[in-house]
Structures are given as C-alpha cells and as structure tokens.
Image (tube, rainbow, N blue to C red):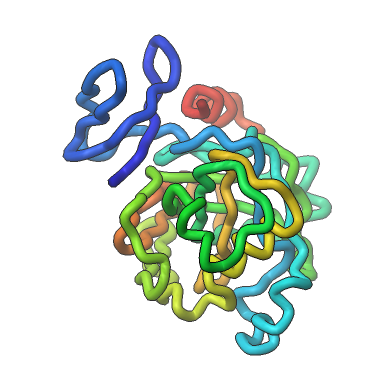
Amino acid sequence: MKLARIATDDGPVAGRYEDGVLHADDGAYDVGADPDFLPPCDPAALYRIDGDVAGADEQSAREHVDALDFVAEPAASLVGHRAPVPAPDPADELAADKLVAVGEFAAVIDERCRNVSEDAVPEIVRGYAIRNDVVAVDRSGHPVRNAVDGPVGLGPWIETAVDPTGVGVRFDVTGERRREATTESMPFDPVEIVSSLSRRVSLRSGDVVSLGSPAAPESVEAGDAVETTYEGVGTLRNTVVDSSEPEGRDEREALRA
C-alpha cells in the first residue's frame, strides 16, 4: 500500500494512493499518475548515519554498527516528489568543493519506541520511502551544509508492502544512468540501523531513518534532474536549482508542506 500526501487549498491531505487517486478520510482526490506529492510524512526529526558507509568494508562495518554516529536533521529540510532542491548559496562556494547527490533508502517509524530489538523492528516501521540527498562537500568529502531548508527530497510515498532486502536500485542524473545496484550491497541491514538508533534516542511516529545507499554519491549541478528508483517502492524525482535565484526559492516554498 502506498501512503502519500498532497497539497490542497485546505492544507495537506494524506491517504492511500492508487491508480492516480488519493483515497483520504474526507473522500477521493483525482491527482493523476505522477502528481507533485508532498513529503509522505511529517517527521519530528530525520536521522542519517554520519559519514560514508557505502564504501566501507562490509565485515568491519558490521562489527562497528553500535559505534556508528547518527546526525539529526531538521524536518524543514524536506521537500516532496518533483519538488526542487537547492544548490549551495554563493556564500557556501568558498567552503564547498562540489555538489553531490545520493539516492538513499529510508524507513518511516510508525509508533513511538525506544530500545527496539532487531526482531521487533518490522512491527514499528510503517514502511519505506526514498530520500534524494543533495549535499555540498569539501575537498575531503565532508558535508559543509546540513541545517538548511530544502536539500532533501523524500517520497514519492511510503510503501508498506516491501521487503527491504535485495531491492534493486537505479540512480539517474538528467536521464543518464549513473548507478545500478541492490540493497544487498549496503553495509548494514535496515533492521540493524533502526535498532541501533533506537538505543540512542526515542523514535516518534513519522520520524525518518535513512538507511544509506548501495551507490556512492554522484556529482551534480544546478539544472540536473535527480531520479532514484527502488524496485517495489517507486521513483523519486527532484531537480537541483540555484537557491540564489528568486524563482528557485519561490517554487521550493510552494511545493514544501
């Protein structure tokens, strides 16, 4: 089942999306086959693993799952399917070496929880979504900007009926296929990450936990269309825009929840 959110004149509406129709508590909305979805949830926090684990040695990474650091990001950083994401402001250019994008797998928490065992993780996960993360990095590959509006696409919906293991992944930039992989090559199993994080913080309904990506980040620039597909979940599409231009700022504000 696909759980999605759309913008209406009366505010955001959430429901079950199927064949171009969003089925909500107050009725059905005909939104078409590829609408401009809002982020599919309204999280109190977004969590991701700090650092690059995609290229880590699998065995050594698994041995240190409980030593991982997590970063909490503001919910204001989220935009939905087909919404623009900003390139760095001119003030960031002195610190940034380049702009990269990565299409990550993400778990959405269904209920407040703490100290969740790996066996119990499926019971507290509502479903899975895709996260398009656009980040400016320095010459060492470290992010130089995190606490800003709009650099993270989430969606296009939450898929509740998917096995997160062995999922095929495709990552395209402006129509060019950059990566193909499966989630089997990710350093950690999704349940390991969620369980480990729950031993650090209390997770709340709607919180988003990034599970990483089997593909390394790819260089992008303003004007590029970033498209990530996780089979069984869907395809999330976002366009990188120049955040210094008024059109980019106005469009981003209009498409965010």
Query: Closest to the observer: 38 or 128?
Result: 128
Q: Position of residue 241 (x, y in %)?
A: 54, 40
Q: Within the image, what quadrant is residue 3 found in?
A: top left
Q: State whether residue 57 is above or below residue 36.
A: below
Q: Residue at x 55, y 25 (%)?
A: 253
Query: Closest to the observer: 203 or 215?
Result: 203
Query: Closest to the observer: 181 or 177?
Result: 181
Q: Residue at x 38, y 28 (%)?
A: 14
Horizontal placement of 97 versus 30: left or right?
right
- Residue sitting farthest toward the left: 19
From this viewpoint, is residue 96 visible?
yes
Horizontal placement of 215 versus 29: left or right?
right
Q: State whether residue 156 is above or below residue 68.
A: above
Q: State whether residue 59 is above or below residue 200.
A: below
Q: State whether residue 122 is above or below residue 166.
A: above
From this viewpoint, is residue 86 visible?
no
Query: Closest to the observer: 200 or 115?
Result: 115
Q: Residue at x 47, y 28 (%)?
A: 255
Q: Residue at x 64, y 33 (%)?
A: 76
**Image mark count:** 0
Q: Position of residue 131 (x, y in %)?
A: 51, 52
Horizontal placement of 20 versus 158: left or right?
left
Q: Position of residue 252 (x, y in %)?
A: 53, 30
- Residue sitting farthest toward the right: 94
Q: Position of residue 204 (x, y in %)?
A: 62, 41
